[in-house]
Image (cartoon, rainbow, N blue to C red):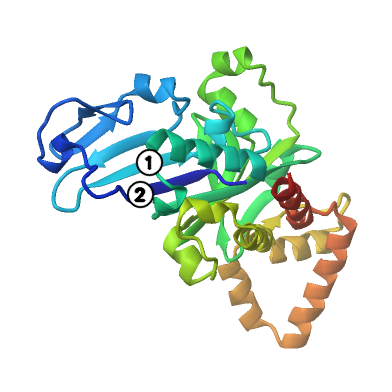
């Protein structure tokens, strides 16, 4: 549901640590977290103190200077599920995570301002995850890039300036990163799970998608969650798969390839043909699509988001 966030808590007046306020490069303690200097202007919370509070997946740092600030970032999903994101993360679990963050930092959650990149996602079950990933060829008007760990393909992605979409197998990704840990956690890849993930700038979400997302507490607002659910569902409709039916004739194969090729080539061919020929061929392609296995994920995504929001 909600994954990576970048939070900038507004500290109460007079509560900025002395070392940060005065740019003193020394280790200090704040809210029972231990911070150490990291370079000239940064203090990072050490891993041991983060782990002791159940935040081993998160990063927390102070920046010094006239515009000194605190930043807390990474995956809310993984906080709750001990580093895993191949399972469900419901609204009630999100609420527990947010309330706990506010308690640990001694701040009202309305004071956790959201800026920069923000991720929201769903995990859905499919018949064959690897086949689906291989069949994904485009997102809207651009080709997708492969997501690799070494030489192993585990997903595909498309990047725009203000947002990104990823489709990948989260279990396979985790196993490729640390097989021994996954075995200890009982994570086994049955090739049936796909994660569809949207990453967008918070400012873009507010100003272009008109979703009133400003602080951490907003993530518990049903109106905000509903709008995020509609957005990921809508964006998923731009995923284009080469799900051609079997036993196509030579002419049908050419028609299929024509409409699933790169957009730039398709536009060139469109200009070469008259409109009636172009749209006649397009109808033939749409008829062929009906014979293939439907790979429209939007309904599954919508249903899963609704389930997560209601639980």
Q: Mark 2: which secondary structure? A: strand
**At 59% across and 42% down in the image, what residue appears?**
94
Label 1 sits on residue: 72
Label 2 sits on residue: 8
Where's residue 90, x and y in %?
67, 42
**Residue 26 seen by the camera:** yes
Of residue 125 and residue 227, the one placed in the foreground of this image is 227
**Residue 161 seen by the camera:** no
Looking at the image, residue 166 lies above or below residue 128: below
**At 46% across and 30% down in the image, what residue appears?**
57
Q: Mark 1: which secondary structure? A: strand
Residue 14 appears left or right of 105: left
Q: Distance between the residues labelled 1 and 2?
A: 6 Å
Looking at the image, residue 82 lies above or below residue 12: above
Picture quarter with the C terminus: top right
Looking at the image, residue 25 lies above or below residue 132: above
Q: In which quarter of the image is residue 35?
A: top left
């Amino acid at each position: 549901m909600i994954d990576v966030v970048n939070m900038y808590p507004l500290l109460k007046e007079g509560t900025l640590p002395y070392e940060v306020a005065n740019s003193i490069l020394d280790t200090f303690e704040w809210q029972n977290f231990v911070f150490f200097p990291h370079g000239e202007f940064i203090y990072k919370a050490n891993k041991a103190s983060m782990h002791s509070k159940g935040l081993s997946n998160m990063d927390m740092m102070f920046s010094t200077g006239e515009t000194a600030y605190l930043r807390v970032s990474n995956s809310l999903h993984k906080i709750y599920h001990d580093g895993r994101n191949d399972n469900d993360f419901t609204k009630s679990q999100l609420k527990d995570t947010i309330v706990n963050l506010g308690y640990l930092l001694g701040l009202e959650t309305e004071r956790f301002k959201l800026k920069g990149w923000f991720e929201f996602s769903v995990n859905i079950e499919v018949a064959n995850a690897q086949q689906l990933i291989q069949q994904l060829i485009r997102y809207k008007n651009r080709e997708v890039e492969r997501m690799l760990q070494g030489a192993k393909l585990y997903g595909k992605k498309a990047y725009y300036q203000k947002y990104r979409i990823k489709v990948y197998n989260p279990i396979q990704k985790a196993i490729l990163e640390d097989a021994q840990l996954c075995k200890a956690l009982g994570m086994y890849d049955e090739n049936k799970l796909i994660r569809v993930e949207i990453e967008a700038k918070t400012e873009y979400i507010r100003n272009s998608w008109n979703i009133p997302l400003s602080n951490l507490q907003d993530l518990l607002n049903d109106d905000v969650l509903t709008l995020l659910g509609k957005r990921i569902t809508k964006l998923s409709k731009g995923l284009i798969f080469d799900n051609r039916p079997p036993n196509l004739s030579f002419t049908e194969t050419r028609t299929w390839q024509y409409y699933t090729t790169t957009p730039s080539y398709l536009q060139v061919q469109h200009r070469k043909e008259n409109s009636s020929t172009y749209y006649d061929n397009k109808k033939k392609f749409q008829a062929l699509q009906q014979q293939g296995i439907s790979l429209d994920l939007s309904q599954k995504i919508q249903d899963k988001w609704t389930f997560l929001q209601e639980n």
